[in-house]
Amino acid sequence: MKKFINYIKECIAEMKKVAWPTGKQVVSYTKVILITTVIFAVILGLADFLLLRGAFLIF
């Protein structure tokens, strides 16, 4: 049990060293991720559509 308590104390000490992002940074990062995801989804969807159309023209 002593090892477990020591582990928890070390975890807490390490978490205090972490440079946590501010609320504005979190919102900013989230926007970037969402926009990037949408852009990639559109690109992949368009590629899928064009390849499917090309396959129908060939076959």
Image: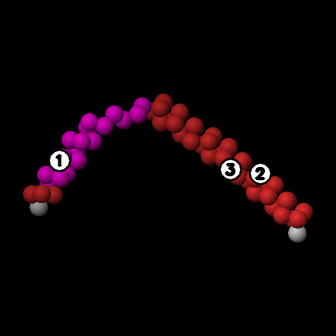
Q: Looking at the image, which residue is at 85% across and 59% down?
A: 54
> Which is nearer the N-term, disc 3 or disc 1?
1
- Contact? badges 2 and 3 (CB < 8 Å): no
Q: Looking at the image, which residue is at 62% across and 46% down?
A: 37
Q: Nearer the viewer, residue 27 or 29?
A: 29
Depth check, mark 1 against mark 2: the one in front is 2
- Name the residue tied to disc 2: 46
Crowd around label 1: few <14 · some 14–19 · many ≥20 (10 Å):
few
Q: Is residue 55 left or right of residue 41?
A: right
Q: Nearer the viewer, residue 20 or 57?
A: 57
Q: Amino acid at mark 2?
A: Leu
- Name the residue tied to disc 3: 41
Magenta segment, which residues?
5-22
> x, y percentage for residue 4?
16, 58
Q: Is residue 6 magenta?
A: yes
> Which is nearer the N-term, disc 2 or disc 3?
3
Q: Does dot 2 land on a helix, a strand or a loop?
A: helix
Q: Amino acid at mark 3?
A: Ala
Q: Is residue 24 left or right of residue 13?
A: right
- Name the residue tied to disc 1: 9
User: Residue 1 has which mark?
Assistant: none
> x, y percentage for residue 8?
19, 51
> x, y percentage for residue 2?
9, 57
Report the Cα–Cα distance between label 3 and label 1. 43 Å
Report the Cα–Cα distance between label 1 and label 2. 51 Å
